[in-house]
Amino acid sequence: MQAEARSHRDPVLRELTRPAVLDQPDFASALAFLLSRKLSSDLVRKATIFALVRDFQRSRPSTVEMAAADLVSIRARDPAATGYLVPFLFFKGFHAIQSYRLAHWLWHESRQPLAQYVQSRASELFAVDIHPAARLGQRIMFDHGTGIVVGETAVIEDDVALLQNVTLGGTGKESGDRHPKVRRGALIGTGAKVLGNIEIGEGAKVGAGSIVLKSVSPFTTVVGNPARVVGTRHEGLPSLTMDQTLPPLEYEI
């Protein structure tokens, strides 16, 4: 309904919304159409990617519900999202997460080279690099998205928010389980680097530009290089309010 109303007002937008949304029978098909246009290339045809995404959706129907939940979450948390159409069509953080889900399925179907194609293509398009083996939940928000890097053994649980230029990386050449685990409802601010097999606790908040090398307790705010605890233990999930303010410094770890 929103797509139809906007397309009537703008004939150029109608050329975009009709094939991408209005001509699609349901949300799953619209998402497959969108991803096929984004992830195809001179070497891999749109029709091939569309069929691949539809196979993925039929094999893992819960991922369609997860994509819808991601979209609803963006609408609730991002004041720039005045509806669902704009983030669906244009928010590359949303696109990157849906592309990751396709790549993750391929990875676990023993189709790693194709999973890495999807990862590489998504990285080129969205400037977001998520390893296909990483584990992501739902209702995740990559605000702006640009420059986000998520390593192979990283975990991002439900309701987490990451802002631009966040890295969930390793600390060197070590192998095995080497990347951060970000628990439910955590908020990681712009440019923060979280490095190593450490845990960002449930409801924790990491300030912009911080370098985090040690685990962060639940419902705790850290800031700085190296990151240190500031203020007192807070309540609630900062990712839902997107409150990036910091309390006065009281003690350090």
Image (cartoon, rainbow, N blue to C red):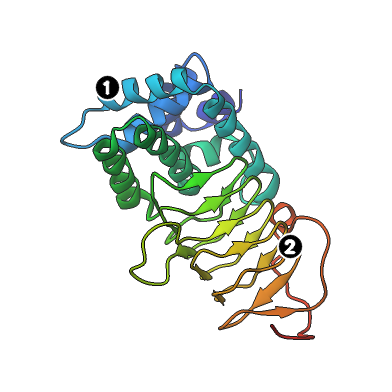
Q: Secondary structure at mark 1?
A: helix
Under circle 2, the secondary element is: loop
Q: Amino acid at mark 1?
A: Ala
Nearer-the-camera pick, 206 or 191 = 206
Amino acid carrying label 2: it is Pro
**Sequence-first tag of 2 and 1:** 1
Give the Cα separation between the discs numbered 2 and 1: 45 Å
Q: Is residue 45 above or below residue 87?
A: above
* Left or right, 108 with reference to 112: right
Mark 2 surroundings: few (<14), some (14-19) or many (≥20) residues within 10 A: many
Q: Position of residue 54 (x, y in %)?
A: 40, 20
Query: Could you classify mark 1 by the number of other residues whose Cα lies within 10 Å: few (under 14), some (14-19), or many (20 or more)?
Result: few
**Front residue of this view, candidates 20 and 31:** 31
Say whether marks 2 and 1 touch (CB < 8 Å): no
Location of residue 84 (image quadrant): top right
Q: Residue at x 69, y 83 (%)?
A: 253
Q: Which circle marks residue 218 in the picture? A: 2
- Pick the residue in front: 157 or 144: 157
**Could you tell me residue 187's position as x and y percent?**
65, 60
Residue position for label 1: 47
Instruction: For the N terminus, give its image quadrant.
Output: top right
In the figure, residue 17 lies in which quadrant? top left
Is 174 drawn above or below residue 78 in the view shown? Answer: below
Q: Quadrant of residue 206?
A: bottom right
Q: Nearer the viewer, mark 2 or mark 1?
A: 2
Residue at coordinates 28% horizontally, 33% vertically from top-left? Answer: 111
Q: How many marks?
A: 2
Q: Position of residue 98 (x, y in %)?
A: 46, 38
Report the front residue among 122 and 56.
56
> Residue at left 31%, top 37%?
39
Residue at the left extreme, as displayed: 43
| Residue 135 point in image, percent of width and height | 50, 45
